[in-house]
Image (cartoon, grey):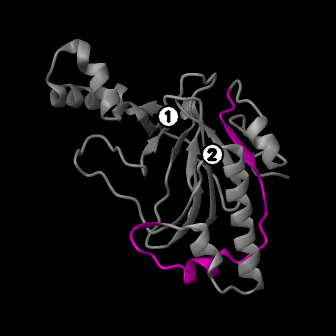
C-alpha cells in the first residue's frame, strides 16, 4: 500500500500525465507520482564535482559521466524527468546540493527554506520537486501550521522593525517575504516526501483554488542531495 494513500492533503497518481493534469481541490494541495526507482543515484553524487553549496548540473555534465549499469539507469531516469517537465513547459533545475544559505539576520523569525514556508508566483504555476538521493523535504497539513506573522510576539517585533505608517505594514511583510513563513503547531505531524517520488505542490498564486502547500527543506547534516526542482 502507498505510504501517502490515506493522507487527505496528498493525492497519489500513477503517471506524469495524471500528475500535471489533476486539479488541486478541497484539502488536497500536494500530488505525488509515487515511484520506486531502480538505479544507483549515489554513484552520480560521487562523480559530480560540487562547485558551490548548490551546483546546477547541466544535461551535458550529466551525460559526460562514466557510469556503471546501475548508475546509467539512474541517469536515464533523471534525464527522462527533465525532458517530461521541459516538454510540459516547466523549467526544471537539477542540482547537487550540500546546503542552502541560512538567514540569520533576525532572531525572532526564520525566513530561509529550512523554515516552513509556501512558494508564491504572480502567474498560474506549481512547484515540482524530486529528491533522488539524500534527505528529502517535509510538508505540513495547513491546519497544523500557523503563519509566523500572526504570532503576537513576532508581529510586535516586525512592527518595530517596520516603524512606518500602519497602511504600509502589509506591503512591508510581502516585500520582505515574511508572510510566506510558518511555524508548526504543537503535535504537528510533518509528512516526509521521500526519495524518488515526483511531487507537485500548490503555491500561492492568483488562480489557485486551494491553500498553498506548507513545506521545508531538510537538514542535510553534511550529506549531499540530488534534487530536481522547478
- How many C-alpha atoms fall within 10 Å of the one at disc 2: few (<14), some, or many (≥20)? some
Task: Report, in whole angstroms, how far the alpha carbon at label 2 lies from the one at label 1.
Answer: 29 Å
Q: Position of residue 188 (x, y in %)?
A: 54, 41
Observer-nearest residue: 139 or 71? 71
The disc at residue 90 is 2
Q: Position of residue 229 (x, y in %)?
A: 57, 53
Q: Quadrant of residue 23?
A: top right
What residue is drawn where x is 54% and y is 29%? Answer: 123
Q: Position of residue 58 (x, y in %)?
A: 56, 67
Mark 1 lies on a secondary structure that is strand
Give the answer, above or below, for where 215 lies relative to 150. below
Query: Marks 2 and 1: which is nearer the front?
Result: 2
Observer-nearest residue: 210 or 2? 210
Identify the residue under disc 1.
145
Q: Quadrant of residue 162?
A: top left
Q: Position of residue 131 (x, y in %)?
A: 62, 60
Residues at badges 2 and 1 in contact (C-beta under 8 Å)?
no
Q: Which residues are magenta?
A: 27-55
Observer-nearest residue: 60 or 26? 60
Task: Using residue 169 as the reference point, say whether residue 23 is left or right of it.
Answer: right
The answer to whether residue 151 shows anywhere in this view is no
Mark 2 lies on a secondary structure that is loop
Q: Quadrant of residue 100?
A: bottom left
Residue 35 sits inside the magenta stretch: yes
What residue is drawn where x is 35% and y is 58%? Answer: 101
What residue is drawn where x is 76% and y is 81%? Answer: 70
The disc at residue 61 is none
Residue 103 sits inside the magenta stretch: no
Amino acid at each position: 500500500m502507498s505510504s501517502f494513500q490515506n493522507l487527505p492533503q496528498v493525492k497519489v497518481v500513477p503517471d506524469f500525465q495524471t500528475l500535471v493534469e489533476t486539479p488541486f481541490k478541497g484539502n488536497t494541495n500536494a500530488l505525488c507520482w509515487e515511484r520506486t526507482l531502480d538505479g544507483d543515484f549515489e554513484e552520480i553524487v560521487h562523480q559530480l564535482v560540487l562547485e558551490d553549496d548548490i551546483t546546477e548540473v547541466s544535461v551535458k555534465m550529466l551525460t559526460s559521466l562514466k557510469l556503471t549499469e546501475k548508475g546509467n539507469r539512474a541517469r536515464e531516469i533523471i534525464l527522462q524527468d527533465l525532458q517530461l517537465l521541459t516538454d510540459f513547459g516547466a523549467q526544471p533545475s537539477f542540482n547537487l546540493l550540500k546546503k542552502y544559505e541560512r538567514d540569520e539576520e533576525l532572531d525572532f523569525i526564520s525566513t530561509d527554506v529550512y523554515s516552513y514556508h509556501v512558494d508564491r508566483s504572480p502567474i498560474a504555476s506549481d512547484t515540482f520537486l524530486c529528491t533522488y538521493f539524500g534527505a528529502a523535504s517535509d510538508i505540513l497539513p495547513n491546519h497544523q501550521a500557523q503563519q509566523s506573522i500572526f504570532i503576537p510576539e513576532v508581529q510586535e517585533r516586525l512592527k518595530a522593525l517596520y516603524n512606518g505608517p500602519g497602511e504600509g505594514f502589509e506591503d512591508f511583510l510581502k516585500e520582505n517575504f515574511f508572510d510566506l513563513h510558518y511555524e508548526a503547531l504543537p503535535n504537528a505531524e510533518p509528512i516526509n516526501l521521500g526519495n524518488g517520488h515526483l511531487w507537485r505542490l500548490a503555491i500561492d498564486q492568483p488562480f489557485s483554488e486551494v491553500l498553498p502547500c506548507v513545506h521545508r527543506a531538510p537538514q542535510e547534516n553534511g550529506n549531499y542531495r540530488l534534487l530536481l526542482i522547478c
